[in-house]
Image: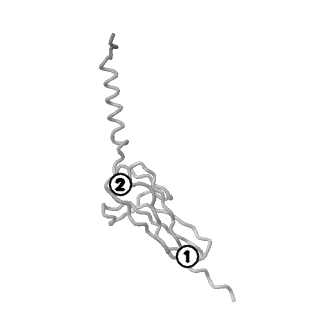
Amino acid sequence: PPPPPPPPPHNLERPQITCQAVQGSVLTASAGLWSGGTPMTFAYRWERCDRTGSSCAPISDAVAATYTPKRKDVGRALRVAVTATNAAGSSIGFSLPTSPIVRSAGASFAPLTASLTHRFRTRFWLRPRG
């Protein structure tokens, strides 16, 4: 008789997101722990949620193990969906949502700093004391 088919993927431990929930910081997802027949492949899909981590929807073109939160992610939580696939089928596991994404201090102050520096250098002259 032919060997039994391999079992389909089954998520044993949730995918994990590492890094700080800050705009412009790279978030990295791990696949989590899965059982099932090998070989097994993994596909990633990032989702934008409300502040509490519910009402999530896919982010277009966010289909890699890493994602860099954008301006429109500020104040919202993110999660990642990992789809494991083998010869017997596929299954999806979800990470816990991040805390709400916060604005990067560097991103919000950089244009202001450059503007003030330019104004100071072009409108005021410093004279050495002597």
**Which of 98/86 is in front?**
98
Q: Position of residue 47 (x, y in %)?
A: 40, 61
Query: Which residue lies under the disc numbered 1?
Result: 35
Locate residue 46: give its quadrant. Answer: bottom left
- Is residue 57 visible in this depiction of the protein? yes
Q: Give the position of the N terminus as an image quadrant.
A: bottom right
- Does the CB distance between marks 1 and 2 fall below 8 Å? no
Instruction: Name above or below for residue 48 compared with residue 93.
Output: above
Instruction: Name above or below for residue 110 compared with residue 8.
Output: above
Q: How many marks?
A: 2
Query: Which residue lies under the disc numbered 2?
Result: 101
**Mark pair 1, 2: CA separation:** 32 Å
Instruction: Name above or below for residue 66 compared with residue 105.
Output: below
Q: Residue at 46%, 64% (x, y): give it.
A: 16
The amino acid type found where label 1 is placed reads: Ser
Locate residue 86: give its quadrant. Answer: bottom right
- Position of 57 with respect to 9 (left or right) is left
Q: Earlier in the sequence, mark 1 or mark 2?
A: 1
The amino acid type found where label 2 is placed reads: Ile
Q: Position of residue 48 (x, y in %)?
A: 37, 60
**Element at badge 2?**
loop
- Position of 38 with respect to 69 (left or right) is right
Q: Residues within 10 Å of mark 2 (few under 14, many from 20)?
A: many
Residue furthest to the right: 1
Residue furthest to the top: 130
Q: Position of residue 130 (x, y in %)?
A: 33, 10
Q: Residues within 10 Å of mark 1 (few under 14, many from 20)?
A: some
Q: Residue at 34%, 28% (x, y): give it.
A: 117
